[in-house]
Image (cartoon, rainbow, N blue to C red):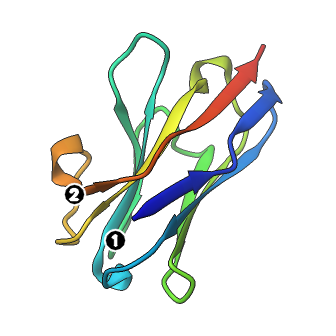
Amino acid sequence: QLQASGGGLVQAGGSLRLSCAASGGTFSGYTVGWFRQPPGKEREFVAAISWNIYYADSVKGRFTISKDNASKMVYLQMNSLKAEDTAVYYCAADRYGRRSSARNAYDYWGQGTQVTVSS
């Protein structure tokens, strides 16, 4: 089970840190990813962490994903936020630990947390 938190309203150029808390499972072997769904658009990949880390081009250099296996937490530090980052953000986990940005690779999903960036 995953639970995302940390969303809110922030001005453009500001920062937010999202958290994803996991319960159950062998968390250390999972790939955990962040996706987002902007208003009226499809859900899209943002970042993921497994044995390596990878980002969508749109967030590279601004967002940082990190994972704490001991506490079963994954974080998404978002800096230099832009209006186009406005979306509902979801964390998801792939129990097979694959490297993938595809939504259907992820078995478990948390509820979303709203991020709104005002310009």
> Residue, x 35% and y 70% (percent of image)?
52
> Residue, x 32% and y 76% (percent of image)?
51
Residue at numbered disc 2: 107
Q: Earlier in the sequence, mark 1 or mark 2?
A: 1
Q: Secondary structure at mark 1?
A: loop
Amino acid type, mark 2: Asp
Sort mark 2 into few (<14), some (14-19) or many (20+) by Cα contacts within 10 Å: few
**8 to the left or right of 85:** right
Q: Looking at this view, is 62 or 108 the one in front?
A: 108
Residue 40, quarter of the rendered image: top left
Q: Is residue 114 above or below residue 61?
A: above
Mark 1–mark 2 distance (CA, rounded to whole Å): 15 Å
Q: Looking at this view, is 27 or 1 the one in front?
A: 1
Taking the view exactly as shown, the residue that stands out farthest to the top is 40
Q: Is residue 44 above or below residue 49?
A: above
Q: Secondary structure at mark 2?
A: loop
> In the image, residue 58 lies at what x, y percent?
48, 32
Residue at numbered disc 1: 50
**64 to the left or right of 92:** right
Image disc number at residue 91: none
**87 to the left or right of 27:** right
Amino acid type, mark 1: Ser
State which quarter of the image contains the C terminus.
top right
**Residue 102 in sight from this viewpoint:** no
> In the image, residue 31 lies at what x, y percent?
31, 67
Sort mark 1 into few (<14), some (14-19) or many (20+) by Cα contacts within 10 Å: many
> In the image, residue 92 lies at what x, y percent?
36, 54
Instruction: Give the foreground label among 1 and 2.
Output: 2
State which quarter of the image contains the N terminus.
bottom left
